[in-house]
Image (cartoon, rainbow, N blue to C red):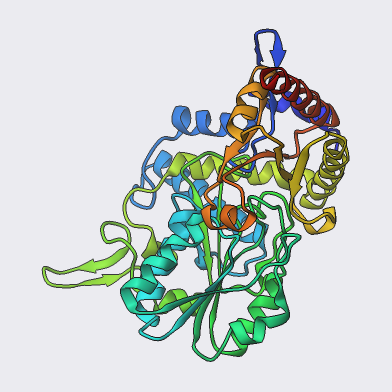
Amino acid sequence: MNVYHLLNDFPILQREINGKRIVYLDSAATSQKPRQVIQALVDYYEGYNANVHRAVYKIGEEATQAYEGVRQKVADFIGAKDTGSIIFTRNATEAINLVAYSWGRENVGEGDEIVLTPMEHHSNLVPWQLLAAERGATLKFIEMNADGTLDLGGLDSTITERTKLVSVTHMSNVLGTINPIRQIADAAHAVGAVMVTDAAQSAPHLALDVEALGADFVAFSSHKMLGPTGVGVLYGRRDLLEAMPPFIGGGDMIKQVWLDRAKWNDLPWKFEAGTPNIADVIGFGAALDYLNGIGMEVVRRHEIEITEYALRKLREVEGLTMYGPANVENRGGLVSFNIEDVHPHDLATLLDRDNVCVRAGHHCCHPLMRMMEVSATARASFYLYNTPEDVDALAESILRAREVFARVAV
């Protein structure tokens, strides 16, 4: 992959502010979009804007074919054998909530246990808190090691005969930790529990195979993998989806309706009520084409190299603490860190003066921050369009920021 040639595909990365280029290091929050994705949106609105599934006129058929064609692309991208197992949602958060509301409220009861980890994004924590409170279930947590990996030594005592559901992030959005989902899924299935995986951070960066992963439900979002906002995906096992009641009622999720009852549509449309986000789903298809054109193995290799370089450069900064596994093979393309005596928000503000864009805050992981004994961290996250020069700009800007605070302290 020639990353420097690739940069030409991203208009926003050509922009300069006050004579300085944008160094975008916040792809874990949302990725930038290539021209091909932007053009796919323009083509739809200019050429065949129509509602899907209903019209028999030509542009309506074109819209339906384009929209449903993306479902096949998603299935191929994640190794799913059945397009009926691909549900389009607004985002990964909605996908997880769909499971909590539809599967959870039918299957979790008083005294049952839901197993999570302390590193979960709030989107994979709060829905289960709500479900547990409503149904009288108990939340349990797999313990963590000091290096930010999961301690699986006590897995058999955490996942028990009372466990109904296990939900674990594939890749931490704070630590970068890549969790052994297959091992955890096998433990869950051994006691008859269902396995849910939050793949919002892993799907953009790893070659994802849901069959090999072993999870029963997998959730991820378009906007973190070069696609538009407003599109998420829930992959689910067909037998589980068939048995689940609808999540939202309305049009397109029905076959027939009487005054007092209704008959639900087939999968996947049973879970896709109302007019879907047609344009952005089509844009997501263009993003998948772009990623497939590069190859996810190539994307992963590039990010390992960038992350390894970033870890090496940031270790040279005095007073800087980094979090997460030291082994780049076991972490994603991000680095969370703090500078001694500098609040992450202040640091991010000073980095912005150099057009270096990083995230600062709790990253929707309050419990993990408390466990780490910090109020927040700064986070630099990388993607296929980042270069070693971006890492150099980050390190140099951090040094300048540290000097500013050193002068203020004096």
Q: Along the line of sight, which residue is nearer the eye, 400 or 200?
A: 400
Residue reaching furthest front? 410
Q: Nearer the viewer, residue 271 or 189?
A: 189
Farthest top residue? 19
Of the 4 image quadrants, the one containing the C terminus is: top right
Vertical comparison of 5 with 87: above or below: above
Against 345, is 92 above or below? below
> Could you tell me which residue is drawn at 76 percent across and 39 percent down?
384
* Quadrant in which the N terminus is drawn: top right
Residue 297 to residue 79: above or below = above
Does any portion of residue 333 appear in the rendered image? no
- Relative placement, left or right, of 255 versus 83 is left
Which residue shows up at 46% across the image and 59% down it? 95
Tell me residue 213's x, y (percent): 68, 70
**Residue 268 visible in image:** yes
Q: Residue at x 62, y 67 (%)?
A: 80
* Left or right of 234, for residue 4: right
Of 29 and 156, the residue lying toward us: 156
Name the side, left or right, on which 134 lies relative to 159: left
- Residue 230 location in percent, x, y? 46, 43
Spot occupied by residue 175 in the image (x, y as percentages of width and height): 69, 53
Using the rendered view, name the quadrant where residue 312 is placed. top right
